[in-house]
């Protein structure tokens, strides 16, 4: 009997499931909780899933419920989930000096969504070194704030945990039940957190392209204009989309919340702007909060759900449908309205296959989010704004919450677990997981039909 070989699109989702299962078992150990009483299966499963899927929604307070061992497990799960199970396992192979087969390189290529097998291991090494460097710098920066407040060892532990959590866009924290609310007026902590979130969400391709171009700019003493002109088209698209969304998110939050005493209303204008900026950044897909999310107006709930749905950028630690996906669809729509045959950005044509992929991602992700919101309202009795906010936060792997998650029924918690998992691997990945072309007729072209849309 011929052994069936799993494809990359099947190995990656299975890898995440195995990591979630291992985390669940470890978190069910008696010494994983502060009380010494073993966590229930559903609590351990939910916490393991939210850590691996770098989401941040919790059913118990991370800072008080889990022991030091439990928090360390959560930190490792966040790191592994942020990097991806394939990258982590491949890194272990590199450390053990194991040889890589062509198939292993192909799986790694698919995990990073690269174009070829050439330079895959070199790319992995650069990713690991880049991640460790950024998280290390983040730890040092956080330490200046946390060590004086909590003491050397505890402050350093807090600095490390929050650096990894912020960079991986996880949103889990050890501060207390109100996330970063105690630091609402601390510009230093909020800015460090925002920088880590944005850098993690930009994606590895953007990092390396920016670094290489910056080196060339400095070497030849070219100006900033030369630097931006010589960035790759993907990097330019991501940077523009990220900047626009951050500005729109900040302005939108200010307009919707500046009079709301439950959020920004009581703050001075400097505090309003800082916290509106932080809210804009954390919507996409970090999950830290410096203002009470249950105090948001209904307009902000809808606005925030849209930003959470968009998320960060490809090949990074953020979730959502991704900035580039939205940009591709928007540019494609504009090209159609203008009567152009192709969508063009930065003097480069967008391939039609990429537009089709972006449309599929948008459709399946939106259907998942809307259907899950309906189920949460219908079977858990949640209010529509709360259900929508919680579900879009889960599918976008954000982690912002209006306080609904801890009060969900067993059905509601399982639904959110599924949303977090599907949001991390992507609904398209699940479709590819079960896809089998039995007919072998995938390339058959049928006669063109006549249909009407619009």
Image (cartoon, helix red, strand yellow):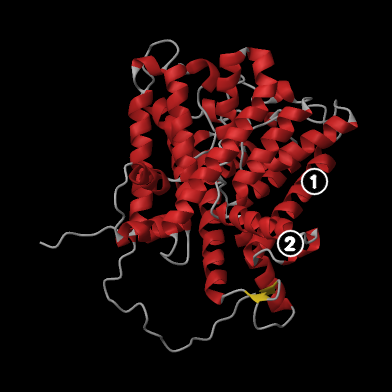
- Residue 111 visible? The answer is no
- State the image quarter where residue 351 is shown: bottom right
Q: CA distance from mark 2 to mark 1?
A: 41 Å
Task: Name above or below for residue 130 compared with residue 24.
Answer: below
- State the image quarter where residue 170 is shown: top right
Q: Where residue 426 sits in the image (x, y, percent)?
A: 47, 53
Closer-to-camera residue (399/313): 313
Q: In the visual, does 269 lie left or right of 263?
A: right
**Label 1, on which residue?**
252
Q: Where residue 74 sits in the image (x, y, percent)?
A: 46, 28
The residue positioned 32% from the left and 46% from the top of the image is 97
The residue positioned 43% from the left and 65% from the top of the image is 118
Q: Are marks 2 and 1 in contact (CB under 8 Å)?
A: no
Q: Residue furthest bottom?
A: 447
Q: Where residue 8 sits in the image (x, y, percent)?
A: 35, 58
Task: Name above or below for residue 136 compared with residue 91.
Answer: above
Q: Residue furthest right?
A: 269
Q: Earlier in the sequence, mark 2 or mark 1?
A: 2
Label 2 neighbour load within 10 Å: few <14, some 14-19, many 20+: few
Quarter of the image with the C terminus is bottom right
**Mark 2 falls on what kind of element?**
helix
Q: Report the mark closest to the observer, 2 or 1.
A: 2
Task: Name above or below for residue 101 compared with residue 71.
Answer: below
**Label 2, on which residue?**
220
**Mark 1 falls on what kind of element?**
helix
- Residue 386 visible? The answer is yes
Label 1 neighbour load within 10 Å: few <14, some 14-19, many 20+: some
């Amino acid at each position: 009997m011929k052994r069936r070989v799993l494809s990359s699109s099947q190995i990656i989702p299975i890898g995440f499931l195995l990591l979630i299962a291992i985390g669940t078992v470890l978190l069910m150990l008696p010494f994983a909780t502060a009380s010494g009483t073993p966590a229930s299966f559903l609590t351990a499963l939910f916490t393991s899933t939210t850590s691996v899927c770098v989401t941040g929604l919790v059913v118990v307070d991370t800072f008080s419920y889990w022991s030091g061992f439990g928090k360390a497990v959560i930190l490792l799960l966040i790191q592994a989930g942020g990097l991806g199970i394939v990258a982590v396992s491949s890194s272990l192979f590199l450390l053990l000096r194991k040889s890589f087969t062509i198939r292993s390189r192909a799986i790694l290529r698919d995990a990073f969504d690269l174009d070829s097998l050439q330079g895959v291991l070199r790319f992995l090494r650069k990713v690991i070194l880049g991640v460790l460097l950024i998280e290390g710098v983040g730890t040092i920066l956080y330490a200046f704030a946390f060590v004086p407040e909590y003491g050397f060892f505890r402050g350093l532990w807090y600095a490390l945990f929050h650096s990894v959590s912020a960079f991986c866009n996880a949103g889990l924290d050890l501060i207390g039940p109100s996330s970063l609310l105690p630091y609402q007026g601390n510009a230093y902590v909020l800015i460090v957190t925002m920088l880590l979130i944005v850098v993690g969400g930009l994606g590895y391709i953007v990092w390396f392209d920016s670094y290489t171009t910056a080196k060339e700019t400095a070497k030849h003493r070219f100006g900033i204009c030369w630097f931006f002109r010589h960035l790759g088209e993907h990097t330019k698209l991501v940077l523009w989309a990220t900047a626009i969304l951050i500005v729109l998110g900040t302005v939108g939050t200010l307009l919707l919340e500046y009079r709301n005493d439950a959020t920004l209303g009581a703050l001075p204008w400097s505090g309003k702007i800082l916290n509106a900026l932080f809210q804009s950044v954390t919507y996409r897909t970090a999950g830290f909060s410096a203002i009470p999310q249950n105090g948001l107006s209904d307009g902000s709930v809808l606005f925030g759900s849209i930003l959470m749905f968009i998320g960060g950028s490809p090949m990074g630690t953020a979730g959502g449908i991704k900035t580039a996906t939205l940009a591709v669809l928007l540019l494609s729509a504009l090209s159609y309205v203008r009567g152009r045959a192709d969508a063009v950005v930065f003097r480069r044509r967008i391939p039609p296959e990429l537009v089709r992929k972006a449309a599929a991602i948008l459709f399946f992700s939106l259907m998942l989010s809307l259907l899950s919101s309906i189920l949460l309202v219908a079977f858990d009795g949640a209010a529509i704004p709360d259900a929508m906010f919680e579900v879009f936060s889960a599918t976008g792997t954000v982690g912002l919450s209006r306080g609904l998650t801890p009060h969900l029924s067993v059905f509601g918690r399982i639904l959110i677990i599924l949303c977090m998992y599907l949001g991390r691997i992507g609904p398209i990945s699940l479709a590819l997981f079960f896809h089998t072309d039995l007919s072998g007729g995938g390339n058959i072209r049928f006669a063109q039909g006549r249909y009407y849309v619009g």
